[in-house]
Image: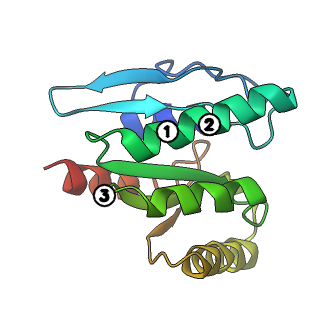
Amino acid sequence: MGKSSLVNAVLGQKGLARTSGQPGKTRQFNFYRVGDRFFAVDLPGFGYARVSKADRARWQQLIGRYMAARESLRLVLHLVDARHDPTALDLEVMALVRESSAVYGILLTKGDKLSGNQRERNRRTAVAAAAGMGLEVPVILTSAHDGRGIDEVRRWILDMTV
């Protein structure tokens, strides 16, 4: 269960964002209207996707422009696989978000796949990576599989969209 599974869990609508057992299936920007409150946007996840270098570069450029120029962007939830330290691509996203006026937070996905000690160690690693980029942000451990962190993410989103 990956990024789109977490989008579905947070928004409470199974099947809203298409899911797949293979990473990188989201190939475009998908906009979802959430009530009358806001739009959620599911962006391509290219960290572990099997895509060409040209596609990866194009996605990076599109996402960078979207985050830097979208005046209506109020909140960025950066999904990072909890099983791994933040990648070079994750650090690039953190650098991009510094240039945005949007509120930013990190959601560590697949938290159910780690032991308690690993979860805390990897959460601290993500906090340190963000701090190294000059960002003091919430880091929430989540799991679309067991629901871990979903209510916390929902509360945070509601607080940011009021």
| Pointer 3 residue | 156
| Pointer 2 residue | 61
At mark 2, the secondary structure is helix
Give the distance between the C-alpha atoms of the residues marked 3 and 2, in whole angstroms: 28 Å
For badge 3, the amino acid type reads: Trp
Q: Residue at x 66, y 62 (%)?
A: 91
At mark 3, the secondary structure is helix
- Would you identify the image quadrant in which residue 27 lies? top right
Q: State which tag comes first along the sequence, 3 or 1.
A: 1
Residue 144 x, y percent position in the rendering: 57, 42
Is 106 in front, or is 29? 29
* Vertical position of residue 126 compared to residue 107: above or below: below
Tag 2–tag 1 contact (CB < 8 Å): yes
At mark 1, the secondary structure is helix
For badge 2, the amino acid type reads: Gln
Q: Residue at x 71, y 80 (%)?
A: 121
Tell me if 32 is positioned left or right of 56 in this view: left
Marks 3 and 1: which is nearer the front? Answer: 1
Disc 1 residue crowd, few under 14, some 14–19, many 20+, Cα 10 Å: few
Q: Is residue 5 visible to the viewer in this orientation of the structure?
A: no
Is 50 in front, or is 107? 50
For badge 1, the amino acid type reads: Arg
Disc 3 residue crowd, few under 14, some 14–19, many 20+, Cα 10 Å: few
Q: Is residue 120 visible to the viewer in this orientation of the structure?
A: yes
| Pointer 1 residue | 65
Query: Where does the N terminus fall, quadrant-wise?
Result: top right
* Vertical position of residue 61 compared to residue 51: above or below: below
Marks 3 and 2: which is nearer the front? Answer: 2
Give the distance between the C-alpha atoms of the residues marked 3 and 1, in whole angstroms: 25 Å
Tell me if 155 is positioned left or right of 30 in this view: left
- Would you identify the image quadrant in which residue 155 lies? bottom left
Q: Residue at x 43, y 46 (%)?
A: 68
